[in-house]
Image (spheres, rainbow, N blue to C red):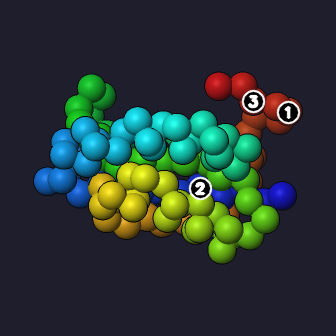
Amino acid sequence: MPFFAAIFEDDLAAAERVRAVAEDAHVAWLEKHRDRVLVAGALRAADGGPATGGLWLIEAESADEARRICTEDPFFTHGLRTSFRLESWSKGFPKGPVTL
């Protein structure tokens, strides 16, 4: 199955409000979809700073399925995510399996 990288941008003005309402649902949703969303985490302009977006590595049958996965996340449906970019991804380094 192909891999995709999703890079999300957040609505910084709404972040605190949306996270307070939807963070538990977001984490539960990621747990439920861990067979597709392999790695997920926040992006920050500086270490320790506020989240400005997110980065996911997704395994999906198609780009359409990966897009659907992105738009079903509670952070997206509650308005935290203002946009996302989806790119096809393939591992180039290192050779062999990677454990994070």
Amino acid at pointer 3: Val
Across and down, in percent, residue 47 comes to: 30, 28
Residue closer to the observer: 24 or 86: 24
Q: Is residue 1 above or below residue 97?
A: below
- Using residue 36 as the reference point, say whether residue 81 is left or right of it: left
* Residue occupied by mark 3: 98
* Residue occupied by mark 1: 96
Quick check: can you spot residue 53? yes
Q: Which mark is residue 5?
A: 2
Looking at the rendered image, the quarter that the N terminus falls into is bottom right
Across and down, in percent, residue 60 comes to: 74, 59
Amino acid at pointer 1: Gly
Disc 3 element: loop
Across and down, in percent, residue 98 comes to: 75, 30
* Local crowd size for mark 1, using a 10 Å CA cut-off: few (<14), some (14–19), many (≥20): few
Mark 3–mark 1 contact, CB under 8 Å?
yes
Amino acid at pointer 2: Ala
- Using residue 13 as the reference point, say whether residue 5 is left or right of it: right
Q: Is residue 36 above or below residue 78?
A: above
